Image (cartoon, grey):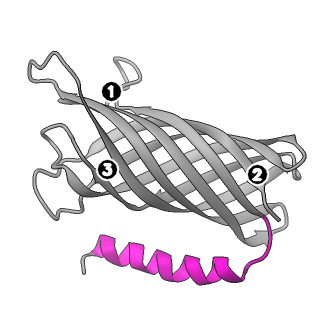
Amino acid sequence: MNFRSLKIFLLLIILIPVCAYSQTNRKIGLYTGTGTERLSDKLDLGFDYRYRVNFFQFEYSHTIHSFGRTNLEGHFTPQFNTTRYKNLDGSDYYKTSYETGLNIAIALRQEIIPRNFSLYIMLGTGPHYIFGAPDRQVSGLIFSDNLFIGAQVRVWDRLHLDIRPGFRHISNAETRHPNLGINSFTLSFGFFLEID
């Protein structure tokens, strides 16, 4: 078992039992968003490729522990994403494909205006399967590592609007080659509904 697999295994062992017994602040949400390796000429992560992704995600979150106005949360996010990609070796056209997977994340949330507005940072990983990729990354089973900084605001009763910019890296933990990875800046938004 490599180090990355060990981290995922330990995260699952810790999160699943804790979330199962915690009975506060459960939410479900639907998200959409986009990712790209290039924001401008100065912010370009894709020196030899282009990889555009559109996210379609369901999310379940659960408060693991509260520290006053600060909450530690677990997030489980199954997703189906569409992609367009090309190599920058003279190719003029994009290929289309898709990816599917599950992310598991930990978030640290600070309530700015209790129950109405909060900010958070989230770190997660999870297995995905990509059906097409630029030459630098072999298709197939990969891991998606994510870092988000987000904001959530109550819009009505138990409904919250969530916005999360972030960074995403996908690669396969050196199980096959090539494995140079694909990096993306991301922006997602969606709605969360409190379910208890």
State the residue position of label 3: 170
Q: Position of residue 86 (x, y in %)?
A: 20, 28
Labels 2 & 1 near each other (Cβ < 8 A): no
Above or below for 22 versus 159: below
Q: Is residue 9 left or right of residue 158?
A: left
Q: Give residue 71's position: percent from left, percent from top.
A: 74, 64
Rendered view: 52 above or below 74: above
* Region of the chain picked out in magenta, as a range: 3-25
**Residue 47 visible:** no
Mark nearest the camera among 3 and 2 is: 2
Mark 3 or mark 1: whose residue is earlier in sequence: 1
> Which of 129/177 is in front?
129
Marks 3 and 2, Cα distance to the nearest angstrom? 29 Å
Q: Element type at marker 2?
A: strand
Q: Callout 1, which amino acid?
A: Asp
Report crowding for label 1: few under 14, some 14 to 19, many 20 or more residues within 10 A (C-alpha). Answer: some
Specify whether residue 35 is in view.
yes
Could you classify mark 3 by the number of other residues whose Cα lies within 10 Å: few (under 14), some (14-19), or many (20 or more)?
A: many
**Which disc is residue 193 wearing?**
2
